[in-house]
Image (cartoon, rainbow, N blue to C red):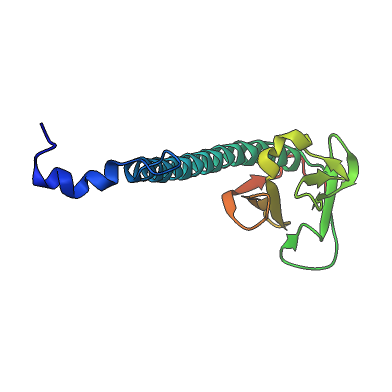
């Protein structure tokens, strides 16, 4: 059927098998399959990376919400606030307070793992910091208003990308001094 056609004779050499059993058509097919496989692998890697980023963003929002609740509860029901120095407002290194759980002179700090501590105790369990999330905390206290202003940020494991943040104010209810 095709043997007598001129274009068949022209490309017939491509279809002939070499000494080792390969021909040009088989090699082209293998190269095309390898290229398609490389594209699929790249697509899957991008999908997995996007999935992990989405999950870590969601976990960061949950962590931020949990920490917001824990911090606001501690500050709202704080007793006597002890101030260091004279100022209009005080940052979190210049005050301590009476905590219902940890007693007098409780203060917030952030450890080297990016976990928030109150009087040296973890405010929430380590496992709540999913995917190695790290927290940053800044608190200011205005003694005239009896109000704390809190800025909470959650960063990724490398501490390079902010995943979420929350700024809020807490009115002191149990002011004892």
Going by the picture, which residue comes out furthest to the top? Answer: 1
Q: Position of residue 140 (x, y in %)?
A: 70, 57
Residue 57 vs 140, above or below: the answer is above
Q: Position of residue 74 (x, y in %)?
A: 75, 39
Q: Is residue 80 visible?
A: no
Going by the picture, which residue comes out furthest to the right? Answer: 104
Q: Residue at the spot x=81%, y=45% of the render?
A: 117
Q: Residue at the spot x=36%, y=44% of the render?
A: 32
Q: Quadrant of the N terminus?
A: top left
Classify residue 71 as left or right of residue 55: right
Q: Position of residue 153 (x, y in %)?
A: 63, 51
Q: Nearer the viewer, residue 162 or 78?
A: 162
Q: Position of residue 107 (x, y in %)?
A: 83, 49
Q: Residue at the spot x=70%, y=48% of the render?
A: 134
Classify residue 38 as left or right of residue 177: left
Q: Residue at the spot x=75%, y=60% of the render?
A: 91
């Amino acid at each position: 059927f095709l043997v007598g056609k001129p274009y068949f004779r022209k490309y017939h050499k491509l279809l002939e098998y070499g000494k080792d059993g390969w021909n040009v058509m088989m090699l082209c097919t293998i190269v095309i399959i390898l290229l398609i496989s490389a594209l699929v692998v790249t697509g899957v890697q991008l999908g997995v990376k996007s999935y992990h980023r989405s999950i870590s963003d969601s976990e960061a929002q949950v962590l931020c919400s949990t920490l917001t609740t824990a911090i606001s509860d501690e500050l709202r029901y704080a007793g006597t606030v002890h101030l260091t120095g004279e100022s209009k407002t005080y940052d979190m290194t210049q005050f301590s307070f009476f905590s219902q759980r940890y007693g007098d002179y409780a203060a917030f700090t952030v450890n080297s793992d990016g976990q928030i501590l109150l009087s040296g105790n973890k405010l929430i369990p380590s496992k709540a910091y999913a995917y190695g999330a790290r927290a940053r905390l800044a608190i200011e206290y205005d003694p005239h208003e009896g109000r704390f202003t809190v800025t909470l940020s959650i960063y990724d494991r490398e501490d390079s990308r902010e995943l979420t943040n929350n700024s809020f104010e807490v009115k002191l209810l149990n002011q004892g001094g």
